[in-house]
Structure formats: C-alpha cells, structure tokens
Amino acid sequence: MIGLIGIVISLILLMYLAYKGFSVIVLAPLLALFAVAWSGLSNELLGFYSQVFMTGLGGYIIKYFPLFLLGAVFGKLMDDSGSAQTIANFFVDKLGHRRAMLSIVLSCAILTYGGVSLFVVGFAVFPIASALFKEFGIPKRLIPAAIMLGALTFTMTALPGTPAIQNAIPMPFFNTDLYAAPGLGTLTSIFILLTGMWWLNKRIAQADLNKEGYGKHFETKLVKSNPSLIIAFAPILIVIITNLVLTKLILPSMDTAYLATDQFGNTSLNSVIGLWAIICALVLACVSIIVLNWKAIVDIKDSIQQGVSSSFLPIFNTASEVGYGSIIASLAGFIILRDFLVGIAPNNPLISEAIVINVLAGITGSASGGLSIALNTMGETYKNLAIEHGISQELMHRVASMASGVLDSLPHNGAVITIITLCGLTHKQSYYDMFVVAVIIPLIVLCGVITLGTLFGSF
C-alpha cells in the first residue's frame, strides 16, 4: 500500500508540473525514480533508470520513430509547398462561404486523415478561418473548436485507416492494422462530426442572437497558395491508397516467414504490417510532394531539415512517458492498482481498458503518451482478457485508440495550448467549446462504441 501511495503522488506531480510547463523529458525519469525511492528501493535507483526507464524509452523510439519523422517531414513539405492551404481553399469554395464552419472542419479532417500534423493544419487553416469568420460575423473564439473537431477527434482515433500515431500504437499489442473495426470506426466518426457540427452551429446561432460578431481582433490576411488542386491532393491520396493496398493486398501476399527467426525478433507479419504500410505510404507521399512541387518549394533541403528537427521533441516527450510507465509497472504497488483497474468490470475488459487509457491520457495531457503507458504496462493483460471473454482484438484496438482521444484534451494538453495561442485567444475565451467537441462528445461516443461492441462484437 505504501508503494501505491508513492505511485499516486508521482502521477499527481507529473500532471501538475507538466501543466505548469516543465519538460516531460525531465519530469518523467525524476518522478518515476521518486516512486521507486518511495517504495523503499533507493539502492536500486540507477538500475531502474538505466535498465528499465531507458529500455522502455528506447523500445518506443525504435518502434515508432519512423512515423514521427516521416509525419513531420510530410507535414512540413505540405506546408511549404502551399498544398495544405490549397486543400483548405477548395472546401471553402465548394461548400460556399456561408458554410464557413463546415468548410474549416472538413479541411482539417482531410489534411489530418492524409497524414498532415496538427501544427501544420493549424497554421494552414487559421488564416482562412479568420478571414471567413470575420466576413460573416462568426465569433473568432469558435475557431479553436472547429480546428479541434476536424483534426483531433474522429480523424485521430476513430476513422479506419487514419495514419495518426494514436491509431498505430495499439497495432502490435493486438496484432491488428490501421483499419481495425472499420464499421464501428466509420459510424462513430460520422456521429462525432454531425454532433460536433450541431453544437458549433448552435453556438453560432446563439452568438447571432446576441449580436456578438467576430470580435475586436487583429485582422489576419488570407494567403493564397500556388499549387493546383490536383497537385495538392495527390500526396494525400497517395498516403490513403498506398496504405490500404499495402495492408490488404501486397504485404499479406509476400513471403515473410523469415520474421519468425531470431535475427528478426521472432515476430510475425501481423505485428508489423500496419507500421510497414504507413511508413511506405509516407515515404512515397514525401517523394511525390518534392517531385510535384520542385520549383514551388523555396529550399527543399531546409524544409526536410525543419521537418526532421520538429519530430524530435514529440517523440522524446512520448517515449519519456513510456519509460515512466515501464518503471511504474515494475513496482509492487502497481500490482494493486492493476488488479483494481481490471476488477472495475471483470467480465468486460473494454470498460477497464477505456478507463485506464482515459485517466492516463488526462494525467499526461497526451493521447499518445497515455495510450503508450497503458498498453506497455497492461496491453498483454487486456489481450489475454479479450481472448478469455471472446472479445475481438480489433474491437480492443478501436476502443483503446478512441479512449486516448477523450481526456487528453484537458486544458494542459499541448495541442490545446498550441491552437489557442495560434489563434491569439485565451482558455477563458475558447476552451468551453473545445471541451464540448473534443471531450464531451467523444466520451459519449466511446460509451456507445463499448455498448455496441459488447452487444454485437466488432464489425
């Protein structure tokens, strides 16, 4: 019990200090070792750091670094080529200016589903959203919620095939791919989009009644982009189509028996097929942007370098949280916590899985961080429980992914802070609507997925 108290204090401190702006890369090992010392293992601190923390951190980087790297480079190339802004302009033109809110949400959704990072999406879409909202008197405070709905909800965790890291992390634990539970994922994505749009349109109507208008803010100029629509959309389509073809047709037909040997870690195609497919898709997409925009990108070498550099901090933040989880999971106090969490719904591991991932994502302020900690510490337990109770591994994957995208969007979340800062607003002005579309609605939908999955299984 003493050890459990230390774990709880450590988690609280991690959440509080991360919210205050301290680096997780520094916090994670220090607070993990604090929990070790509290458990009476002070003489083993260095061993826990070098053999447990760093092994967990290194293992995560080995497995997922290509996704962080290629995703960052791809996003930077889409930004510098002007392709991201061309796609946003396309939706505005086709849907009409009077559907400004839907235009912005769908622009963000298409870009993120195509592999473009949130930060690129935000910078590309915000100037367009600002100009549109100002023209039609829509409050600027609703822009962050529109970006969140399109970029950080259904396209991040629910929509089948999304290359988001939150959809990739569960794959090796449940031997699934990015398209796990496609029927459930598609239905929930539609529901999140429709419900989120209902809420945002309702808020626009309320603002109109109050004659609120755009507000007094610095005017942002609408920047026009150079690439044609075909050139802008080509890399997005390449990611989607290549990923699907490799996952469902090409890779399964290859002779991969060699993976079962010691040299390749005694693994199987099912445990790596999803990662292989999205890596190949992103490489091909990056090459296509360079070829199609050879003259449009001012300095290709600099764009690639900036993309590479921007990938380091996100992966080391998440990997540090995984290392933290590795130490916590190795302590005796964690056994008490694990048994309690599993016992919440002993006959339905979907409920326990959703609760654990939600809590950890909320504590860390990171969907990928909370998901990684949860599955690295309890993934094998949930896999075995699913087999024991006849629950589909694909359903476990989809619930895990969706659970990571609920409480992660609390005020201390890095993406929340970034979007609000980018828009020149404050939490007081914008967070209420962000909370509804990125926390309340996904939480309701998650409960619905668990209910449907329990009654009808995966589809």
Image (cartoon, rainbow, N blue to C red):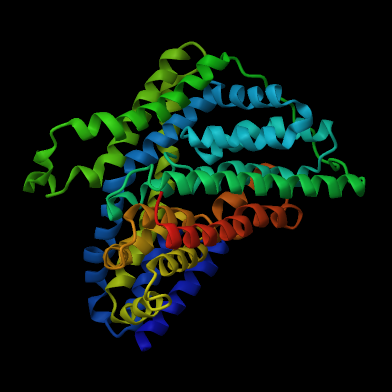
Q: Quadrant of residue 183?
A: top left
Task: Check the image and report above or below for 308 versus 384.
Answer: above
Q: Position of residue 234 (x, y in %)?
A: 47, 20
Task: Check the image and report above or below for 91 versus 137.
Answer: above
Residue 283 lies left or right of residue 84; in this view the side is left
Residue 367 lies left or right of residue 279; in this view the side is right
Q: Quadrant of residue 118?
A: top right
Q: Visible in this render: residue 144?
A: no
Q: Which of the pair 334/345 is nearer the observer? A: 345
Q: Visible in this render: residue 143?
A: yes
Residue at the (40%, 25%) spot, across then down: 286
- Extreme residue toward the left, this view: 262
Task: Check the image and report above or below for 361 versus 219.
Answer: below
Task: Check the image and report above or below for 198 versus 387.
Answer: above
- Extreme residue toward the bottom, this view: 1
Image quarter hosting the N terminus: bottom left
- Extreme residue toward the top, this view: 295
Q: Which of the pair 303/138 is nearer the observer? A: 138
Residue 136 lies left or right of residue 257; in this view the side is right
Q: Which of the pair 27/403 is nearer the observer? A: 403
Q: Position of residue 396 (x, y in %)?
A: 37, 57
Q: Position of residue 110 (x, y in %)?
A: 55, 32
Q: Position of residue 149 (x, y in %)?
A: 62, 45
Total labels drawn: 0
Q: Which of the pair 319/172 is nearer the observer? A: 172
